[in-house]
Amino acid sequence: MKTGVFLFGGVEMDDAGAGPPLATDRRYSSVEAWRATEQLLQIGVEADRLGFDSYWLTEHHFQHEGYEIIPNGLLFGSVLAERTQQIRIGTMFNVVGQWHPLRLAEDFSAMHNISGGRGILGIGRGTVPREAESLGTKIGSFDNPDAMSADEFNRKQFDEAVEVIRLALDNETFSYHGSVYEFPPAGIPDRGGFVETLSLIPRPLYPYEIWQAVTSPPTLDAVPKKGYGGVFWLKNYRVLAEWWKRFGDLWQDANGVELHPGQHRKLVVSVCIEDSYEAAAASVRPGHDEFWKFLGPYGWSRGYVSEDNEPVAAGLIPTLEQSVDNRTWLIGTADDVLESIEAYREELGGLENLVIFPNMPGDDYSKTTEQIQRFAEGILPNL
């Protein structure tokens, strides 16, 4: 089993939890954000030393609230690559519509080559109108009155942009003519003629993987058909098992290849390991509650189900007990967490790619370092 570490990359907070302040009232300085960036690099180095297979951050912009302060995982990854030896480096996820697609292809290729082939191309459509609208796209969300039309444009733009990226990465020369993008634009004069094709410099010197979040029925339908790996997070364990199998069936239908039970699928679970279940619950609760105070209004809990096995209300801010019941949070001793992982492996029929989320919003990075050390010492040898 390949095992990775995924962090949002936020600043440390001394008042994380369900109560005040409001998520939108927080404001941190550039000094505090940069201190967190340096700590994230150090944890990446430690994850490499401990033997984890991959290290993931996420792309977000303009978050003065301090939750996610890395705007460019590819640039960060290039620095981390120079400080590490084995660990693969990815972003969950590069928000494709917020990039010029050819710049994203160039930057990923450069990072991938610098790292000796350790780059992983994570792609997503985004979640936050504040950054989407400011950086060249649109996105639907619960607080966006034009959510449906914004989402339709985003999907169309995303599909075209990813097609452009793949053409650029995989071909010596390429051209593309869509409804959103045209490369090269018509009529560019060049030494007595006109530009007909483009060539990406640099292109990848090594094979690469593409992974996309599977968060809705349309993405569940699309991702396996396009041949990308699927990332599953924040899904009730029964729903997850259904989607996991459906992904494999769709892959086989589209590509004519039967997958191994866990192949091309990645499970992300939030974890907290302490000396007892009670200690883990007390340790993780403030960060868990801060997580949902921040992300609940964006609809991130839509993969949960109620005690009656019914879909939860839109915008639910779950309790820790609900997250444990849905098995999106695995907490307790190392043996407890290992038992939960083994249960997933059995229920899913196989688990080849596991990523842990050990850093809750507001956590001290010393605590995060301890968490990945506990996982590496108490669980990795048994996977």
Image (cartoon, helix red, strand yellow):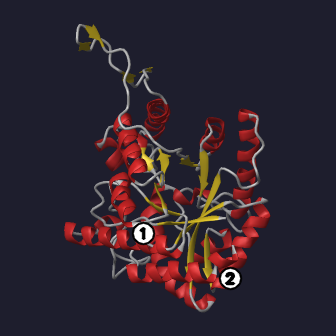
Quadrant of the snapshot with the C terminus: bottom right
* Residue 242: x %, y % from top left: 75, 53
Residue 189 versus residue 278 in the image, above or below: above
Earlier-in-chain disc, 1 versus 2: 1
- 1 vs 2, front mark: 1
The quadrant in which residue 255 appears is top right
29 or 299, which is in the foreground? Answer: 29
Q: Nearer the viewer, residue 314 or 43?
A: 43
Residue 289 visible in rendering: no
Residue 336, which numbered label? 2
Instruction: Using the rendered view, name the quadrant where residue 76 is placed.
Output: bottom left
Q: Which residue is mark 1?
A: 44
Q: Residue at x 41, y 43 (%)?
A: 109
Q: Amino acid at mark 1?
A: Gly
Q: Position of residue 244 (x, y in %)?
A: 71, 52
Q: Is residue 124 left or right of residue 304?
A: left
Label 1 crowd (10 A; few <14 / some 14-19 / many >=20): many
Tell me if residue 172 can be seen: yes
Front one among 162 and 125? 162
Within 10 Å of disc 2 (Cα), the crowding (few <14, some 14-19, many 20+) is: some
**Are circles 1 and 2 on residues that touch, CB within 8 Å?**
no
Mark identifier at residue 338:
none
Against 148, is 189 above or below? above
Q: Residue placed at 59% from the left, 43% from the top?
A: 228
Q: Amino acid at mark 2?
A: Asp
The number of callouts visible is 2
Picture residue at 42% right of the left edge, 39% below the top: 146
Residues at marks 1 and 2, CA–CA distance in whole angstroms: 25 Å
- Disc 2, SS: helix
x and y, in percent, of residue 276 in the image: 62, 91
